[in-house]
Amino acid sequence: MNAERGSVTAFAAVIALAVLVCAGLVVDGGAKLQAYRTAYAVAEEAARAGAGHVNIPSAYTGGRIETSPAQAVSAARAYLSAAGHTGKVALAGGRTVQVTVTTSRPTRLLSLIGIDQVTASATATAHLFHGIEQGRPQ
């Protein structure tokens, strides 16, 4: 009988650790989802801020409606800075601004096993459109 002494204690310790890790995945998994939502929202707004800047000289002289590269990148970066984030801003073609934002959140329970933060990255694009298509009056 003495050979089995303490086996319940070891079992309880292993189960307690497993429950703690599972709770950490739930709680800190929610933190990762929140980090992703934040990154995506900031990337969307920064891309929109950049895509709204039209290259006026190109529009007047050549009739081409496209973004002003310097102004688009500057506006997107200014939005990121005002929102307290950093990210990558790129232009694709003459009308598309693409922004990638990475955010991190500290963990609450997973830090007990050495995972101190969760990180999420999101990319959003915005396109410059021009003109309004008018419907027929009813």
Image (tube, grey):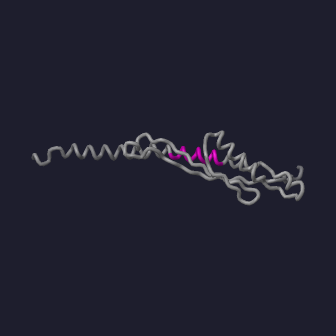
Main secondary structure along the magenta-highlighted residues? helix
| Residue in view at x 37 percent, y 45 percent | 113
Farthest residue in the left direction?
A: 1
Give x and y (percent) for residue 52: 77, 48
Give x and y (percent) for residue 51: 74, 50
Count of residue discs:
0
- 37 or 68: nearer the viewer: 68
Left or right: 135 in relation to 85: right
Q: Is residue 40 magenta?
A: yes
Give x and y (percent) for residue 94: 76, 58
Left or right: 120 in relation to 24: right
| Residue in view at x 88 percent, y 53 percent | 136
Left or right: 7 in relation to 129: left
- 16 or 78: nearer the viewer: 78
Give x and y (percent) for residue 53: 78, 49
Q: Is residue 18 magenta?
A: no
| Residue in view at x 71 percent, y 59 percent | 92
- 62 or 36: nearer the viewer: 62
- 97 or 78: nearer the viewer: 78
Q: Which residues are magenta?
A: 32-43
